[in-house]
Image (cartoon, grey):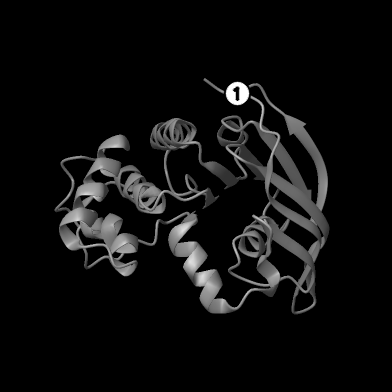
């Protein structure tokens, strides 16, 4: 599959945490509809890179451009709006709200955007079905398996129809079978919807689901490898 249009471009990113240089002159681009894996050992700067690309933190140096906008220069309010509408984020432990049911967790971004409750639940239910967790609507996070909860997190990330999903070690807390099932569901759904995915992982089996892999070492881009699309 060819993805020629850069959707998100970062140039010469640098970020320091205390005395640690988390990113050093990191340049990367994510193309429209592409699944890009960023790999590296613990402490290589993977999560810092994702946070800069998603506008969660600002780089000390360099630029991040999304759809013609300099994310590193946008006000916080606009960045928050982008993360509610055009960006979806999935974390290792899902970060679902424990007091809410699964369907309310998935519907939350829509409710925050002003969508009516009935319509938000209708859309949330459709995304839960796509991720194979229909029937779990009234379960709370503590009542679901890790794999089910992560599928709910992914449904929440995609419910607004984002252009990009940022997934930070989305299978890191799962066993190998659940990991495979969750990745297969995410990749199939993202490809079907034409959504780009930036996938942070240390697991080469997870990275193999991507179109391309970029490797980080000590905060710098080490190399880039194009894959055949995993089936």
Is 224 above or below relative to 67? Answer: above
Residue 25 appears in view:
yes
Q: Which residue is mark 1?
A: 229
- The residue lying toward the viewer, choosing from 228 and 46, is 228
Horizontal and vertical percent for residue 17?
72, 75
Instruction: Identify the residue at the far front of this view.
Output: 68
- The residue lying toward the viewer, choosing from 44 and 231, is 231
> Mark 1 Cα within 10 Å, few/some/many (few <14, many 20+)?
few
Left or right: residue 22 versus residue 168 is right
Q: Residue at x 78, y 37 (%)?
A: 224
Q: Residue at x 27, y 57 (%)?
A: 107
Left or right: residue 86 versus residue 122 is right
Q: Quadrant of residue 125?
A: top left
Q: Quadrant of residue 70?
A: bottom right
Is 118 above or below relative to 113? Answer: above
- Disc 1, SS: loop
Q: Residue at x 80, y 53 (%)?
A: 27
Horizontal and vertical percent for residue 121?
20, 53
Horizontal and vertical percent for residue 87?
50, 56
Is 210 above or below relative to 171? Answer: above
Is 118 above or below relative to 195? Answer: below
Horizontal and vertical percent for residue 33?
57, 37
Residue 219 appears in view:
no
Left or right: residue 115 versus residue 10 is left
Q: Residue at x 39, y 32 (%)?
A: 181
Tally of marks: 1
Q: Quadrant of the N terminus?
A: top right
């Amino acid at each position: 599959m060819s993805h020629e249009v850069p959707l998100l471009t970062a140039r010469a990113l640098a970020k320091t945490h205390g005395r640690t240089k988390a990113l050093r002159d990191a340049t990367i681009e994510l193309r429209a509809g592409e699944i890009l894996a960023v790999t590296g050992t613990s402490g290589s700067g993977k999560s810092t890179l994702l946070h800069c690309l998603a506008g969660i933190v600002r780089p000390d140096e360099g630029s991040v451009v999304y759809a013609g906008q300099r994310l590193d220069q946008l006000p916080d309010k606009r960045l928050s709006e982008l993360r509610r509408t055009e960006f979806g984020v999935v974390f290792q432990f899902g970060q679902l709200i424990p007091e809410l049911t699964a369907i309310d967790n998935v519907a939350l971004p829509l409710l925050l955007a002003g969508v009516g409750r009935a319509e938000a639940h209708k859309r949330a239910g459709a995304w839960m079905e796509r991720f194979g967790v229909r029937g779990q609507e009234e379960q709370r996070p503590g009542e679901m398996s890790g794999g089910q909860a992560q599928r709910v997190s992914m449904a929440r990330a995609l419910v607004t129809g984002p252009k990009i999903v940022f997934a930070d070690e989305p299978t890191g807390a799962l066993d190998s079978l659940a990991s495979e099932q969750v990745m297969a569901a995410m990749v199939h759904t993202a490809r079907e919807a034409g959504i780009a995915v930036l996938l942070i992982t240390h697991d080469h089996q997870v990275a193999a689901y991507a179109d391309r892999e970029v490797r980080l070492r000590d905060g710098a881009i080490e190399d880039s490898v194009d894959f055949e699309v995993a089936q």
